[in-house]
Amino acid sequence: MASIFSIKKKSSKTTRELHIPEHIAFIMDGNGRWAKSRSMPREYGHSKGADVFRDIIRYCGELGVKHITVYAFSTENWKRPENEVNAIMKLLAKFMDEAFADLEKEKVRVIFLGSKEPFSAELRERMEKLERDSSVYERILNVAFNYGGRDEIVHACNELIKEGVTTITPELISSHLYTRLSPDPDLIVRTAGEYRISNFLMWQSAYSEFYFTDKLWPDMTHEDVDAAIAAYSGRERRYGGVVEKKEDAKS
Ligand code: FPP
């Protein structure tokens, strides 16, 4: 269940009641365009994007968001030029160094979504160690890295087959996804003016609310997060059912 939280808006001095989603997912798009507009290499955009990612994650934590998922590297992103892929791998290593150093301060459980198979043994061990060391914390940060939504569903089904399950149910699939420790996302935010799901949380997004912004990811601010949460707070979630309004109920 989403909690209700009041944010004192610095700009307007008014207090607005917002429904803080329990789980927000971000498709962090636009790093390349952000760099290009500054005549810089794409890697520069990813580096700035990683700084913004850390800031936004921290801010969401302050707001009381308990589960955050970020799309950092898809199964399709391996097709990018080698130097770009290497730069993102270095950012992953840097993120892990900082996460280890700040573990006690941030108190967040890090979970990597996706197969770790393509990574070097060293990187894989560090990813697994970070997952282990942070597993005592309740708040969850899912980092989708080498992640694809379809792959995840196939992986879950194969796990079920290995377990000898003969009848698959939605609950069994949900409990075998990489995100099994998080509820489905309440809100999915995509930046950079694209209106696609891009193979992200295909199963989990069945009833998610979407928020799209033209802002490029490296330009995302706390105010943009507030705007996404404000839009979400104004939505009526029906999950395929009907919400009876007071006026309707009278007749
Ligand atoms: C999409 O922008 C962004 C990515 C594919 C990488 C996202 C990575 C980060 C924000 C930093 C790394 C984070 C971690 C946790 C290691 P794009 O390159 O597709 O942008 P474009 O559409 O403008 O080209």
Image (tube, rainbow, N blue to C red):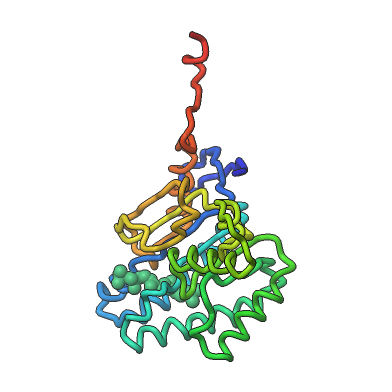
Camera sees residue 49: no
Res 75 quadrant in image: bottom left
Question: How many labels were placed on the picture?
Answer: 0
Q: Is residue 29 above or below residue 240?
A: below
The front one of 202 and 225 is: 202
Quadrant housing the N terminus: top right
Q: Is residue 51 above or below residue 88?
A: above
Residue at the far top: name it. 251
Please tell me which residue is depicted at 59% across the width and 44% down the height of the picture: 2
Res 49 quadrant in image: bottom left
Res 33 quadrant in image: bottom left
x, y percent for residue 3:
62, 43
x, y percent for residue 120:
53, 90
Camera sees residue 123: yes
75 with respect to 119 (left or right): left
Please tell me which residue is depicted at 49% across the width and 40% down the height of the picture: 233
Residue at the far right: name it. 136
73 with respect to 55 (left or right): left
160 with respect to 74 (left or right): right
x, y percent for residue 80:
32, 81
Please tell me which residue is depicted at 60% across the width and 56% down the height of the picture: 172
The front one of 145 and 218 is: 145
Please tell me which residue is depicted at 58% across the width and 91% down the height of the picture: 122
Q: Is residue 235 above or below residue 210?
A: above
- Taking the image as four quarters, which one is ligand 1 found in? bottom left
The front one of 45 and 22 is: 22
x, y percent for residue 192:
32, 61
